[in-house]
Image (spheres, coloured by chain):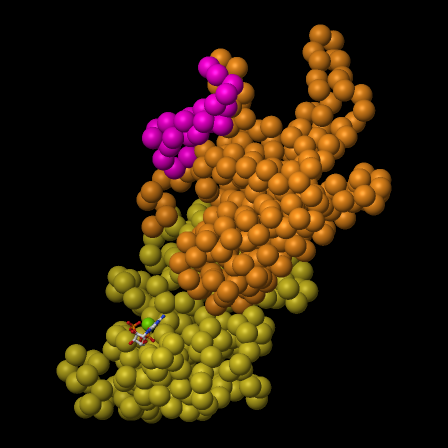
Chain colours: A yellow, B orange
Amino acid sequence: MLTIDGINVAYGKVQVLHDLSLNVKENEIVTIIGSNGAGKTTTLNAIMGALKPTKGKIDFLGKRMDQLDSNKIVASGISIVPEGRRVFPDFSVYENLLTGACVRRMHGTKLAEVENDIKRMYELFPRLKERHSQKAWSLSGGEQQMLAIARSLVSRPKLLLLDEPSLGLAPVLVREVFDIIKTINKDGTTILLVEQNANMALEHSDRAYVIESGKIVVEGPADELRHSEKVKKAYLGG
Amino acid sequence: MGAIYGLIGMGMNLIFNSTGGLNIAQGALVTLGAYAGVTFTVFLKLPVVPAAILTIAAMAIVGSIFGYLIYEPVRFAVPTRFMLAALGAGIFITEMAQIVWGPIPFVVPRFIRQSSLRFGNLVFDTQNLLILSVLLVVVAIIYMLLNKTQIGLMMRAVGQSKEVSALMGIPVRTIIRYTFALSTALATVAGVMAGPIFFVTPSLAVLMSKGFAAAVIGGFGRNVHGVIIGGFIAGVVEVFAAFFISSSYRDAWGFAFLILFLLVRPRGLFGEAAGEKA
Ligand SMILES: Nc1ncnc2c1ncn2[C@@H]1O[C@H](COP(=O)(O)OP(=O)(O)OP(=O)(O)O)[C@@H](O)[C@H]1O
Ligand SMILES: [Mg+2]
């Protein structure tokens, strides 16, 4: 479904990703684990078109994506839950959800249809429904994360990217977030996840990649990685 | 008068929200808008309504070109870069206006011939009534546009975070260009309205500082009404100070008030509390 083939990505002169390749197949949950500054966020931003690779290519559903603008990439069915649950603070919950549908609206989808999707989000996240007209800055961290996930789903992605969705959440909430990710996946959305919470992420994934200094160093089925000595030592706390 | 300040302030507020910088050229765009109005009415002798539509449309295009030429090259730099670029562009526009339309002020005829209306004992100046109603219509349009349309939603999203907006697939550059078009259209309405009051000369640009004051008093926030009320306060303070204290320092009184005001309410009348921005 998604194929990244040997990309280099740089911020100005500083190259961050080096000949990085990975792929995601339809209906999978794939995790990228790696320590701070390894290049996880950079990888996701490159998929979203916020950064353009200087070498290599990114294909999605057989179409080349790497030089397209973000709005084309969203339109083709990829959406992201950005790092640090970046909701729009001055927007209400409802308005935040509407921004998730901007690209669809620009392509002629009726507001009524979007509102139907928002209703479905309220079923999936009942707490958001209660806070329908509350400003996003006043939500708790967990609620903001749910909102960020719901906002991305309103764009009806085929592939959902999540950048450290469990960061800074209490253990109960982390479990809840992963349950939601499982549910979304069962409903037919492919997932590419970035996590430092490697244990939990591997437990819920089909396959995983380990990234170090902008290179993939280990890849394989999630179960295999969970039991590999090397990964255990570096990322699972022994 | 306050209405005109309010319009200018509203335009600056829109740009401030989406770029984080002050558009110092807003005054020059007011001037240019006024000259465009003069061109369509006095030189081309078009009737008022088509002239108004053409003026605003032409200036909206000028605004988006302004955004493209002045803002886009510096969009990744600190906002002060944009302010400096706008400063230069403003001087350029004002000087060009001087060259194209000459240094002699244009006297713009009143929009309505009959000068006053009586309601019982109350007498209203038709000119002021017209300005006030135009302001109300414009505010209603802006409010609807920002709050009820898809473009408005995207403009407000871009105002909060360009990076997240881009990740959501919002075409950020296009939206900012629209914002410049809208803001310039507002400057134009202000310039055209100011024409019959102040004459049309390049010095109309000084109105910008009042518009800025209006925006500051209203609180550079996300709300439209704050700036409008700020505009009225600025207008009223100016007139009263000139009347009761001294008219020779009319502008100075306005700014003295602004400074006092900022000491009392640093975030403006409707500014948000500090914690909310976190
Ligand atoms: N905007 C930027 N400009 C310059 N360098 C950057 C920028 N963003 C990230 N980098 C650098 O790129 C490298 C990879 O950063 P990235 O954010 O992708 O890491 P990450 O794996 O997501 O880390 P974390 O777990 O902390 O989120 C880091 O060395 C970082 O310093
Ligand atoms: Mg990161």
The image shows residue B274 at horizontal and vertical percentages of: 33, 42
Q: Is residue B163 left or right of residue A166?
A: right
**Residue in front for this viewpoint, B246 or A72:** B246
Instruction: For residue A101, say whether it is visible.
Output: no
Residue positioned 39% across, 50% down in the render: A137
Q: Quadrant of ligand 2?
A: bottom left
Q: How many marks?
A: 0
Quadrant assignment, res B9: top right
In the orientation shown, which residue stands out farthest toward the top?
Answer: B121
The image shows residue B168 at horizontal and vertical percentages of: 50, 66
Q: Which residues are magenta?
A: B245-270
Q: Is residue B171 left or right of residue A84?
A: right
The quadrant the N terminus of chain B occupies is: top right
Quadrant assignment, res B133: top right
Residue positioned 57% across, 58% down in the render: B67
Residue positioned 46% across, 53% down in the render: B84
Quadrant assignment, res B52: top right
> Is B14 located above or below residue A8 in the figure?
above
Residue positioned 52% across, 34% down in the render: B210
> Is A126 located above or below residue A107 in the figure?
above
Instruction: For residue B41, say whether it is visible.
Output: yes
**Residue in front for this viewpoint, A124 or B183:** B183
* Magenta stretch encompasses residue B267: yes
> Is B56 located above or below residue A48 in the figure?
above
